[in-house]
Amino acid sequence: MGVSVGLAVTLLAPSAASAAPVVSQGTGRLVQTSLLSSTVLDTVATLRGAAAVNADATGDVVVNTPLDATAVAQLVQLQAGASNLFGTNGVIQLGAVGQYGRAADDGSSAAFSGAVSQAASLIGAGTTVNGGDVGSPTAGSNAQITVGTAASPVSLNVALTGLAASAQQTADGTQTGRYTLTDGSVITGGTVLAPTLNGLRTPLATVIGVANGLGVTVANPIAADGTVRVTLQQLLDAAGVTSVNDLPANTNLLNYVPQAVTTQVTASVNATLAQLATGATNLGGVGGLTLNAAITTARTTLNPLLTALSSTLSTNLAPAITTAAQLNVNRQATGADGAFTQTALRVGVGPNGSIAAVDLASATVGPNAGIAAVPVVNPASASIAGGALVLAAIAALLVQRRRRSTALAAA
């Protein structure tokens, strides 16, 4: 198929599973993107998600639909610029993910999509969702998102052990959504960040060399490949919240990468210098004096760089990241028909998702009409009954005419 576009911000919006009023409905949908044409969505059933529709209250409806081979084959052909959007070596790789919908007789419904390991906590104890893979995320990860390389202005490698969303509608019509991102990390690199990191690594390498020569073994905290790893918790700390669920709807997590990198780098450099100082104290004598002198020289270079680090990264790294990608969490939307959708994550590639925009892990419930949607008389039975009434009326009319004719003849 090989699809590539220049603008892909408007996604195919989730819609109610049935146009006619139904008792209840819920749809879990793993992937939504405008890069998938309506033809693909119409022909590949599992890309439409797990749609549970309860039309007549004759029993709860549960649909459990992992992406099948045909769906995965369609996804891996999508292109985000010059890169594969999905699959092995793609921008997005997913492991053990599924789609689930439940529509109950009492007018309530639930939906789920994402990491099957999160189903019980988000949709209810005992819930089992069938899973499958789209690509091969790194070991221990449920979702991996990779943008750029070391030669790009910025490179991002995001790994999450859990990515999922759920939506529920109670029998009284209350709609709620939940989502989860668990144990995540972001590795950031690229040509914009590399000079700053090299400026820190070089004086550290010098003083560490002196320490090693004196028998004090210390590792350089600045990676040689020009990357920095920060955790999801460090991103949340930079955002000033304790949980992903405390973030406002549609928050771009990547906005907090520069501050998290600043905090991580500053802490690791200072911790290394403190470790070297302890080593100098333990050495004592000439060795201690020599190492302390090297530490002082290193601090002369490092301290101004660390002081300016936050400003430096806000100036150059922040806009580079924003141009490269966005990770918008906790997206919520209510359609004109009353359907409510909770989405865990929207991945944008390019400025404002102009190269590709993909919603991952969406769950939609409603509109639910409840028991009022159940016809009082079965349509087929009503048709038969209606025909019988017409025949009875015709028979009554014939009898009435026959009696009238008999009465006139007697007169």
Image (cartoon, rainbow, N blue to C red):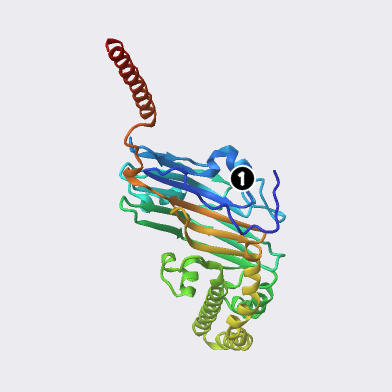
Q: Nearer the viewer, residue 401 or 350?
A: 401
* Position of 382 relative to 51 (above/below): above
Q: Quadrant of the C terminus?
A: top left
Specify the quadrant of the image occupied by residue 252: bottom right
The kind of residue on which mark 1 rests is Ser
**Which quadrant: the N terminus?**
top right
Name of the residue lying farthest toward the top: 410
Residue nearest the viewer, comparing 360 with 104: 104
Front residue (pair 67, 307):
67
SS state under label 1: helix
Residue 313 % position (x, y): 61, 78
Q: Looking at the image, can residue 355 be seen?
A: yes
Q: Residues within 10 Å of mark 1 (few under 14, many from 20)?
A: few
Tag count: 1
| Residue 224 visible from this viewpoint | no
- Taking the image as shown, residue 101 lies to the left or right of residue 193, namely left
Coordinates of residue 302 in the picture (x, y in percent): 61, 84
Q: Which quarter of the picture shows residue 315?
A: bottom right
Q: What residue appears at the point 43 percent right and 54 percent down from the top-left corner? A: 338
Above/below status of 400 relative to 81: above
In this rendering, position of residue 131 left or right of residue 219: left
**In the image, residue 10 lies at what x, y percent?**
60, 57
Residues 10 and 180: in front is: 10
Name the residue: 48% across, 45% down.
98
**Residue lying furthest front in this view?**
411
Coordinates of residue 274 in the picture (x, y in percent): 51, 81
Q: Residue at x 45, y 51 (%)?
A: 364
- Point 68% across, 62% down: residue: 149
Residue placed under numbered mark 1 in the picture: 38
